[in-house]
Image (tube, grey):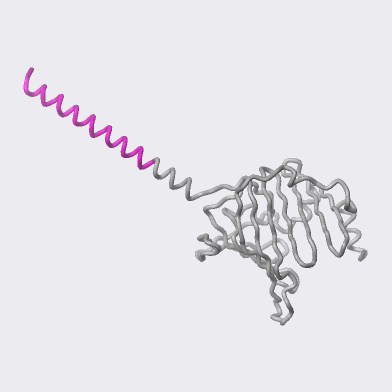
Amino acid sequence: MGIHLVWHRILLSLVKQTTMKKIRITGLILMTMACGFSNAQKTISEGTITYNISTQSIEKSSQADPLKGATNTIYLKGSLSRTDMLSSLGKETTIYDGKAGLEVILKEYSGQKLMITLTKENRATQNKKFEGINFETTSETKQIAGYNCKKATAILKDGSLLTVYFAPEININNKEYNPAFKNLPGLPVQYEFENGKLKFQYLLASIDFGPLPISKFDVPKSGYRVMTYDENRQERKVGY
């Protein structure tokens, strides 16, 4: 065997070994990047998110916070969502079936229990101010509740301002649970808006990724005075 042929085979063997090492190293790098990306982002398809609610008078009066100690708890399971707002004034629950496009609002105030049913069209009317909402993300960042958050703002159709700090590493699979955050690229950790003479602030208190029973989203069959969305609007107009 000629010396040139021997060296050719040796070089070919070295090239193959080097190439295989490069492939293995590249593969490890890609796997590491993929794992890091997976760990950096989490999608919530089922779980419980709780916020603490506080209010502040825009006129800076000494009036006590009417929602002191109030909480807003969101339950998610696939296309189903339930929101419970509990305060010293009473309780309000919203149950929404994303597939059917139907919503039910349960109100329990001053010993009265009211159930309001909404069609898909009713829901669109009720949330008209959030239609086409577009968030502008700023360069401001802040750590809130242990999350690195970005600040974003949006002007609603009624002219009001919605300010939110969101965690981009956590996404909510059900984008319909709250029309205000349908286009928000992450989990709202803290947000505030004005309503009348009050500024409302919601601050993330906890997240539980545990499974939920389907019964959590059942609509009560009795115990409530039932009325449609249009009937409720008419009743409010005449001051009942």
Among all residues in the image, which is located at the extreme top? 1
Q: Quadrant of residue 4?
A: top left
Count of labels in the image: 0
Residue at 16% of width from left, 29% of height from top? 11
Residue 168 lies, in percent from the top left, at: 53, 55
Q: Measured along the vertical axis of the image, is residue 224 above or below residue 57? A: above
Residue 230 lies, in percent from the top left, at: 87, 53
What residue span does the magenta drawing correspond to? 1-30
Left or right of 63, for residue 40: left
Residue 10 lies, in percent from the top left, at: 14, 27
Q: Main secondary structure of the magenta part?
A: helix
Tell me the quadrant of the picture where the N terminus can be found. Answer: top left
Among all residues in the image, which is located at the extreme left? 3
Q: Measured along the vertical axis of the image, is residue 56 above or below residue 52? A: below
Q: Quadrant of residue 16?
A: top left
Left or right of 235, for residue 25: left
Residue at 62% of width from left, 53% of height from top? 183
Tell me the quadrant of the picture where the C terminus can be found. Answer: bottom right
Q: Is residue 22 magenta?
A: yes
Residue at 62% of width from left, 45% of height from top? 45
Q: Is residue 73 magenta?
A: no
Among all residues in the image, which is located at the extreme bottom? 62
Left or right of 131, for residue 164: left
Left or right of 187, for residue 158: right
Residue at 84% of width from left, 63% of height from top? 109
For the residue pair 217 and 227, the one nearer the viewer reads as 217
